[in-house]
Image (cartoon, rainbow, N blue to C red):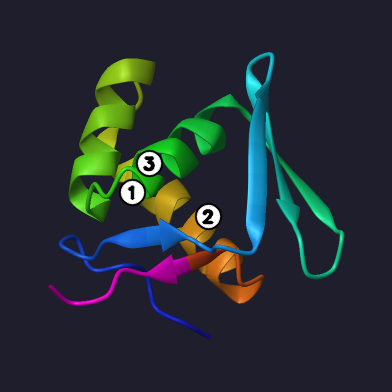
């Protein structure tokens, strides 16, 4: 099983995805398989911020502040989301600069 993201780790959306906000949620389509994934509001915000190049620590801090959630809880949720998105091939590690 893959580990939680390191706090300084950054990611990018796979080029094989298309996504859109639908009300408070988001729908992410895997263009290779045609399978789509639904993300709730908090996960959708994490997805957006990860795609903007923020590292895991920055994403957790921003989501914690925006949603009024405990930072430790957000970090745990983010770790689970990143693991799942990477497993599905929707989220990739950013290339080293």
Residue at (42, 50) in percent of width and height: 78
Judging by the rendered image, the residue that carries numbered circle 1 is 75
Drawn side of residue 51 relative to residue 14, left or right: left
Q: Is residue 67 left or right of residue 36?
A: left
Q: Who comes first in sequence, dot 2 or dot 3?
A: 3
**Secondary structure beneath disc 1?**
helix
- The disc at residue 81 is 2
Q: Position of residue 9 (x, y in %)?
A: 23, 66
Foreground label between 3 and 1: 1
- Crowding at dot 2, Cα within 10 Å, few <14 / some 14-19 / many 20+, comes out as some
Vertical arrangement, residue 64 with respect to residue 1, above or below: above
Residue that appears at 58% across and 62% down: 85
Query: Is mark 2 in CB contact (under 8 Å) with mark 1?
Result: no
Provide the major secondary structure of the magenta segment: loop
Where residue 47 appears, as percent x and y from the top left, is 48, 43
State which region is magenta: 92-97
The residues tagged by marks 2 and 1 sit, at their Cα atoms, a distance apart of 10 Å
Query: What residue sits right under mark 3 in the picture?
Result: 73
Alpha carbon distance from label 2 to label 3:
12 Å
């Amino acid at each position: 099983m893959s580990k939680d993201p390191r706090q300084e780790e950054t990611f990018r959306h796979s080029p094989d995805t298309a996504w859109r906000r639908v009300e408070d949620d988001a729908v992410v389509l895997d263009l290779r398989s045609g399978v789509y994934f639904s993300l709730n509001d908090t996960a959708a915000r994490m997805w957006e911020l990860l795609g903007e190049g923020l590292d895991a620590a920055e994403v957790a801090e921003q989501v914690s502040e925006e949603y009024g959630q405990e930072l430790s809880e957000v970090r745990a949720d983010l770790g689970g989301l990143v693991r799942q998105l990477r497993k599905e091939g929707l989220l990739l590690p950013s290339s080293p600069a």
